[in-house]
Image (spheres, coloured by chain):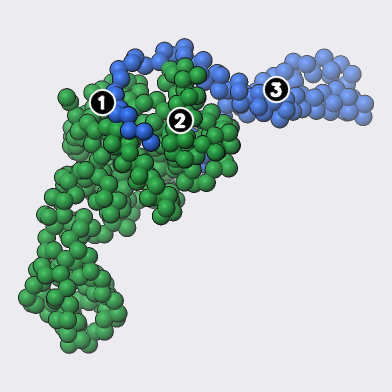
Chain colours: A green, B blue
Amino acid sequence: MPDAITTEALRKVYPAPSGRRRPAAGGPGGPGGIAPAVSSTRTSAAGIIALDGLDLSVRRGELFGLLGPNGAGKTTTIGILTTRVSATSGRALVAGHDVATAAVRVRQHIGVVPQRPNPDRSLTTVENLVFHAAYFGFPFDRANRSALELLERLGISDKADAKVESLSGGQQQRLMIARALIHEPEVIFLDEPTVGLDPKARLDLWGILREMHAQGRTIVMTTHYMEEADQLCERVAIVDRGTLLACDTPERLKASAPGGTLIEVTLDGPAERVVAGVKALPHVSRAEAHGDVLHAYSDRSGEGIPAIIAVAQGASRGVTNIHLTSPSLESLFISMTGRKLD
Amino acid sequence: MNAAPFVPDNRPPASPAAVFAALLRRDIRVARRELPSFLVRTIMQPVLFLIVFGYLLPKMGFLRADYSGALLPGIIAVSLTLSSVQSVALPMVQDFGFTREI
C-alpha cells in the first residue's frame, strides 16, 4: 500500500515582504499573528523561503508529528498538504492524489483541525457538522445521525443546539475535531492543536487523538511542545528553516541526542568565564554559555553538579538555579539547531 | 469513542450541484433564522430614502416637483449597489479577517 503522504523536494517561497502580512494559511506567527522570528526564516532576493526542499513520507495509520520552532515551515507544510497553499516547486501526494492537480480529491480524503477554531458562526454546533458533511455529499439524515454520535463521543452533546459563540475554547476545539471527522477522512491534519488549551483539555485531546489513531486513521500534527511529540507520536520529523533535520521514532531520536543529560545552571552573571573550567571536568562532553545560563552535557546524570558549582564559585559566580533535562527531544533539538523551541 | 476500525472509502467527490444545493440550504436556514433583522436591513434603507427624498425634501421646497420621477430608478439603483456590497463584500471581509472562517 502506498504511503498516506509523500512529499518530494517541496519548496515554498513567499513573495518578498512589502509590509503586507503573509497569507493567513501560511502565517506561522501563531495565535497572536506575530511575525516570525527573523532567525527562524531565511529571506532571499525572491522572498521568504518557508520550505526548502522538504522530503517527507507518512505511512498509513501513523500518528506523525511535525516538530519545529515558530516559523520553521510547519504551518506552510500543512497548508500545502491541505491544498490551501500552492507550492513553488516539488510534488506532494496525499492519500494517493496530487495536491496540485487533484485538489478536490485530496480534500475529500482529509480532515483539518485549524490552528484557531473557525466554525461557521451563524450555525449551531450540530448544524456546523451536518452542513459540513453535506458539502461532502452526505445525505442530511445520515449526516445528522453521525453528527450527534460524534458530539456524544467528544463529550459536547449537551451543546448540540447551542450557538457556536457560547462554546468555550476547548469545546470549540472539539467541534473542530468533530468537523474534521464527520466526512470520514483518511488523513487528519492538526495544526498546533493544543495551543491555548488548559492542561486538562490538552490531556483530553491527547486521549481523543490516541483513539482516532487506534481506529487506524493517519494523523499528522504539528507542535512545538516536545513532550507532546514524545508521548503521542509514533514518528517525529524535526523541521527547521524549511528543511528536514531528522525523522524517526521519538525513542531513536532521543538515543541519538549527544552527551546525555543536559544540566542547565543559571548563574548570577554572564556564564562565559565558567565555560572553560566546566569543559575540563570529567563527564562533561560539551559546555556552552547562553547569557547567564550555562548548558553542560553530562554522560552521568547528576554527578557532575558539585564540580560545576565549585567551578562557578571559583570564578566568583553564584548559582541561582539548576535544571536537569534527561535525554529528550528537547536536548536533541537544542543540539541540532543550537536554539530552543520557544 | 468506539473502536470500529476505520475503512477508507473511495466514493467519488460530491457533484458541484449537490455542493451548491447544500450551500444554498445553509444560506436559506441562516436567512430564515435571521429573518427579522434581514428584513429590517433590506427594507429600511429604501423606505428612508423614499421618506426623505419623496416627501420631506419636496415638502420643504428643496426639490422641484418633477424630481419624484427620478426617484424610483434612483432608489432601485442605490439599493442594488449597497445591498450587493453589504451581502458579498462585507461578509467576505469578516471571514478573511478576524473570524478566519475561510
- Reply above or below: A191 against B37: below
Circles 2 and 3 in contact, beta carbons < 8 Å: no
Give neighbour class at mark 1: few <14, some 14-19, many 20+ (Cα, 10 Å). Answer: many
- On the image, the x and y values in percent for residue A144 come to 50, 24
Kind of residue indicated by mark 3: Ser
* Badge 1 and badge 2 in a common chain: yes
Q: Quadrant of the N terminus of chain A?
A: top left
Q: Name the disc covering residue B79, or none.
A: 3
**For the point 27% across and 47% down, which residue is it?**
A232
Quadrant position of residue A294: bottom left
- On the image, the x and y values in percent for residue A124 come to 56, 33
Q: Chain for mark 1?
A: A
Side of A16 where B32 appears, left or right = right
- Reply above or below: A311 against A217: below
**For the point 85% across and 26% down, which residue is it?**
B51
Quadrant position of residue A173: top left
Q: Chain for mark 2?
A: A
Q: Name the disc covering residue A95, or none.
A: 1
